[in-house]
Amino acid sequence: MTTVSFPKVSPFRRAGLALAFLAGLPAVVMAAAESRSGAEAAAPAAVSGTVAMLTAAPRAAASEGATLASTAGLSTLSELIHAGGWTMYVIVAMSVVALALTVYYLLSLRPSVLYPHALLHKLEIAAAEGDVQLLRDLCVGSDAAAAQVLLGGLEQLEMDNRLDYTVIMAAMEDEGSRQASMLWQRIQYLLDVAVVAPMVGLLGTVLGMLQAFGNLQAEIGSVIPTNLAHGVAKALITTAGGLVVGIPAMLLYGLFRGRVMSLVTGMETACGRIMRRLCMSLKQPAAGEQAKAKAKG
């Protein structure tokens, strides 16, 4: 078994160590006191920071709630229109005009209006019989575009006693071009709405951005986000409103443009068929009279 031997310390050395310990004890106590006072001074700062965080959280929540409330206030159409400013009222008026034009075109741009089947049937019977006066009376008594085209050919036939089919068809083509131009001009108004509505929306966008940056300049020291958001919302609402009106109007214009082309083609075909039948009916008696004159000669 091994034994551990500790070095022997003299009594004088022990006394020196005790004196050194007692001499350093005040410094340790002072350091502990200083650290305690520093902790006590830091505690109020930590508490104040916590309080500031706790008070800032409700303010942020209140601000977010106000923003959500203002956004929810724009949920209805009337409030959206009001938030967009006076340009939105112009866009709404243009949408009403586009709707009225659409209904009017649906009712007026139809074969039953431009060249009714019943009228064409009567005109074909009169043309087969060669009755020019009956044809004229039927055309004068009708407001259909086909009747006006045939009337132009009949007037040319009455002015020139010669039965020249080329001249008569040229007169009918002139009147047909005039009627077609009236139809094209009629649907042009819908194209105008489709072009102008997005431009009005763009004007509202510019005005809204001017308002937003004007508020930002006036409140350079303390910017209020709601004032800035109001101008930006106005800009976006008017842009969307102009596009919502312009895009359907453009699509409807394309639809009616195809319908007008189809109607003009059908009207020209019907009028040409009736006039050819009339010319054939008028040539047959003339050919018979010429044959009789040659036989007598």
Image: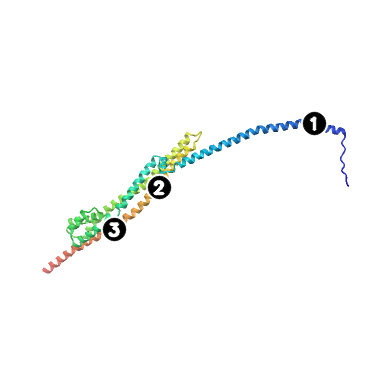
Earlier residue among tags 1 and 2:
1
Q: Is label 1 or label 2 in front?
A: 1
Q: Secondary structure at mark 3?
A: helix
Q: How many marks?
A: 3
Q: Mark 3 Cα within 10 Å, few/some/many (few <14, many 20+)?
A: some
Q: CA distance from mark 3 to mark 1?
A: 123 Å
User: Which residue is more in the foreground, 228 or 72?
Assistant: 72
Q: Is residue 18 visible?
A: yes
Whether label 2 touches label 3, CB < 8 Å: no
Pointers 3 and 1 in contact (C-beta within 8 Å): no
CA distance for labels 2 and 3:
34 Å
Residue 243, how many percent across, how many down? 40, 47
Please rate how many residues cluster around mark 2, counting C-alpha atoms within 10 Å: few if below 14, some from 14 to 19, many from 20. some
Residue located 72% across and 33% down the image = 32
Disc number lying in front (3 or 1): 1
Query: Which residue is pictured at 82% across the width and 32% down the height?
Result: 18
Q: Nearer the viewer, residue 146 or 288?
A: 146
Identify which amino acid the numbered label 2 is placed on. Answer: Val
Task: Tell me which residue sits at (12%, 69%) in the image.
Answer: 295
Label 1: which secondary element: helix
Residue 1 horizontal/vertical position (percent): 88, 47
Identify the residue under disc 2.
Answer: 244
Up the image or down, 201 lies above or below 31; here it is below
Quarter-wise, where is residue 291 in the image? bottom left
Going from N to C along the chain, the mark reached first, 3 or 1, is: 1
Q: Is residue 69 above or below residue 19?
A: below
Q: Quadrant of residue 214?
A: top left
Drawn side of residue 272 relative to residue 255, left or right: left
Marks 1/2 in contact by CB < 8 Å: the verdict is: no
Q: Dot 3 corresponds to which residue? A: 266
Residue 138: image x %, image y %? Answer: 20, 56
How far apart marks 1 and 2 lie (CA) works out to 91 Å
